[in-house]
Image (cartoon, rainbow, N blue to C red):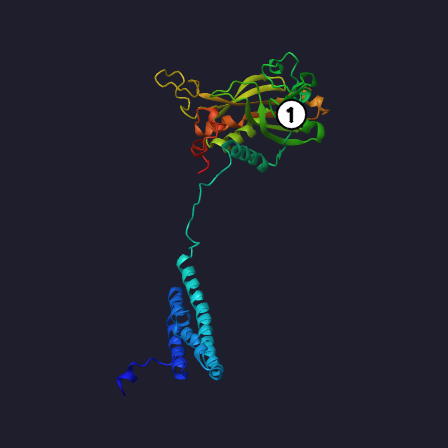
Amino acid sequence: MTAQDTDRQPNPLDADYVLGLVDAALTAIQAADTGAELRQVRADHAGDKSPLALANRAIGQLEPGQRKYAGQLVGQARGRVNQALAARQTEVEAAELQAALLAEQVDVTLPVELHPVGALHPVTALLNEMSDVFIAMGWEVVEGPELESEWLNFDALNMPETHPARGMTDTLFVDPPSDRKLLRTQTSPVQMRTLLSRDVPIYMVSPGKVFRADEYDATHLPMFHQIEGLAVDKGIHLGHLKGTLDHLAMAMFDDVRTRLRPHYFPFTEPSAEMDLECFVCHGESVGNPDRPCRTCKSEGWIEWGGCGVVNPRVLAAAGIDTDVYSGFAFGMGVDRTVMFRNNAPDLRDFVEGDVRFPRSLRGGAR
């Protein structure tokens, strides 16, 4: 072999040479394991500057009679390479997707906290809890409108026209005042609505918002929450009332002492205020100037709510035979109950929306 034969370039249209290009391309394609490697193989073996592309361009230099055979040879070679590239592309993409899924999978058994867990407002939560105490005893929870008539809010409850609570300075009347409509000052109108619409015996509680023209300060709000109860049946007396309220107090405050202190309400007779033993000093501040208690003002007791035996006039206004039936009623502030349970000093914290307040309370949001 002469030096001239050694330096001679291969014929790009030689069958053996073309088949050799195909074998080299197929080997490179099969060896490519990633998308990047496969893109490089495509450029080297099927791109515009690849040997097969150069062979395809060389067909134009042949005699017309040779072009058909050369075209079939190169065309079939390029077809095999492109088919192999497409098949390998599918395999590589599937492998890369599987690897990504394995690398990015999330362990769903791990605890995840994306944001703080919310909760009911403390007052709403306690309203539900207090209602549940009575539901467990077989009582019914009854709700009513917050916009009430003056007759249901006052007259039907034996409150005379001269009673101070009926003045514009204490009650929020709705325009025009001549309509005698008001924002209820208590949930007692719900009790009267129940007496007028239901047959006795009746055992019900009425939780909800009430409204009064009070100052906005640490111990007063113009809107607050009450829960009131009413029981009307044969033979009801003050002992039943005391037992019911003691049961509620134990459910709300665990081991707590209570007392009934004589009082006056126009809708009950006899009437009383129910007091709880001070949860701060437990009565130790009474008569002890060295240990004063701001919570109970050193009296040893804290007022919780009013109660009494239903005045016969109220029952008669609802058409109930007072010779056969009697009843008892009670009511207390739910906001104040939350304060008692948590020793919260300021009622304004209940409505000002600072999330740190409910988080600090028993059963609050976290």
Name the quarter where the C terminus is drawn: top left
Task: Reply above or below: 203 against 305.
Answer: below
Residue 262 occupies quadrant:
top right
| Left or right of residue 230, residue 26 in this image | left
Residue 47 occupies quadrant:
bottom left
Instruction: Looking at the picture, tell me which residue is in the foreground, 323 or 250.
Output: 250
Residue assigned mark 1: 147
Q: Can residue 75 be spotted in the picture? A: yes
Residue pictured at 46% horizontal, 41% vertical: 117
Instruction: Looking at the picture, tell me which residue is in the foreground, 323 or 176.
Output: 176
Secondary structure of the residue carrying tag 1 is strand
Label count reads 1
Q: Residue reaching furthest bottom?
A: 1
Q: What residue type is disc 1 on?
A: Leu
Task: Reply above or below: 288 against 125.
Answer: above
| Left or right of residue 229, residue 59 in this image | left
Q: Residue reaching furthest top?
A: 162
Q: Can residue 239 be spotted in the picture? A: no
Q: Position of residue 335 (x, y in %)?
A: 51, 27
Task: Reply above or below: 111 against 355.
Answer: below
Q: Assess disc 1: are there few (<14), some (14-19) or many (≥20) residues with their C-alpha within 10 Å of its C-alpha.
A: some
Residue 104 occupies quadrant:
bottom left
Residue pictured at 53% horizontal, 35% vertical: 129
Q: Position of residue 132 (x, y in %)?
A: 56, 36
| Left or right of residue 234, residue 357 in this image | left
Q: Position of residue 122 (x, y in %)?
A: 49, 33
